[in-house]
Image: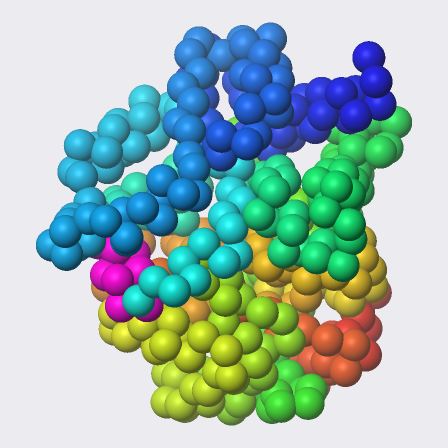
Amino acid sequence: MDAFTTNLEKYAELVIRIGVNLQKGQDLMIESPMESLELTRLIVKKAYEAGASFVQVHWQDDLITRSRFEYAVDEAIDYYPDWYTSMLERFVENGGALLNIKVPDPDLYKGIDASMISRASKAAATARKTYQQYVRTSKFSWCLIKAPTQAWASKVFADFPEEQRMDAMWDAIFRMNRIYEEDPVAAWRIHIKQLQRMREVLNAKKYTALQYRAPGTNLRIELPEGHIWLGGDKGNEQGIRFVANMPTEEVFTMPKKTGVNGTVACTKPLNVNGAIVDKFSFVFENGRVIDYTAEVGYEHLESLMNMDAGSRYLGEVALVPVDSPISNMNRIFYNTGIDENASCHLALGSCYPINIANGAKLSKEELDERGGNTSLIHVDFMMGSADLEIDGVLSNGDVEPVFRKGNWALLF
């Protein structure tokens, strides 16, 4: 077996044992791009070896996805099938686990009207509302992973000769997922414990607010009473631990919906539903975005801002040091699941109810009373840099450093 095949098999083993942490007798659904056939076959093999009862693969293709916006009748853009959402909900309710190889082409919708993408995204989000609630409350085990496609590799490694780009992308994915370690599963267990230690320290602090300073950023974010920092792995409804995003380097919590004030500038491009938004900034007042700018993709940002009543409020605040594995690669991946783990970031839209005490059991109204935001969207954007400073405000009013020069100032 050559080195690449060995590493690919180690990757498949990792996502089954640590990512979804598949249990004997469990069903697994895999959403995979057609270009990831070899990896998907290995994952299916590892799933059955782990005791899966049934593995269903849903194949995806960017050109097929784009064809809807090029050729479908206009009224079809606002349609999303009920039968598909019913299938997803039933799958979760029957104890299944989901693995998504999520690697959209960053330029997938280049030339497509932003309003069409927004309409389709809203229709899907509305139809999948119950399923997304299952996701955000960790009712079941789910995991997002990455695998190269030619279009994505060509975007990220455009400075490489074309014939070297896929190999470069595989190398990056193997490195950020610790596949080159002798035992990646053991390496991940150590990594998860480190993230657990970070969240334990932050939870003990019980900060009432975080204050951010950087070029273009002067922001205060209040944290609700009872907020919980998470990071690394989490438990589903049955208590099974899983890792929702691989790679992951973040610890995150819930901001108070109406407690965000000031300005924030992005530090990396954002892929919004297959369209790039870059060099953008927000102005917040009492939690709501009251002004925004973007030098690239303004129309896509505008569509996002107007998705629903909650899309202009924050739902997540996440901390990632600049001295971390992905950040140290010094490359933009145009994939939020990776770029967010190279930078401190915030998320517009819905919070994760699990980021507050007993949040998974709260109604929408109760969550709102506790300071949580609800929305059809949850879109992370990166705002960390080597210039970022963050202070934590303690319950007695004292202020202490949390980040300095983009890295942790707290001791773990």
Q: Estimate the x, y position of residue 107 in percent, counting from the top left.
A: 50, 58
Placement of the C terminus among the 4 image quadrants: bottom right
Horizontal side of 286 relative to 191 (left or right) equals left
Question: Residue at horizontal 37%, vertical 83%?
Answer: 288
Placement of the N terminus among the 4 image quadrants: top right
Q: In this view, does 372 lie above or below 245?
A: below
The front one of 243 and 146 is: 146
Question: Residue at horizontal 31%, vertical 60%?
Answer: 117
Q: Is residue 246 above or below residue 346?
A: above
Horizontal side of 313 relative to 181 (left or right) equals left
- Residue 217 seen in this snapshot: yes
- In this rendering, the count of numbered labels is 0
Q: Estimate the x, y position of residue 335 in percent, counting from the top left.
A: 58, 55
Give the quadrant of residue 40: top right
Q: Estimate the x, y position of residue 129 in percent, counting from the top left.
A: 26, 49
Q: Is residue 259 above or below residue 273?
A: below
Q: Report the predominant secondary structure element of the magenta stretch.
A: helix
How does the figure colour the protein chain or chains?
rainbow
Question: Residue at horizontal 63%, vertical 71%?
Answer: 268
Question: Residue at horizontal 84%, vertical 33%?
Answer: 180
- Residue 176 seen in this snapshot: no
- What segment carries the magenta color? 114-123
The front one of 16 and 163 is: 163
Q: Residue furthest front?
A: 162
Q: Decide whether residue 215 is among the magenta residues.
A: no
The front one of 328 and 362 is: 328
Q: Residue furthest right?
A: 182
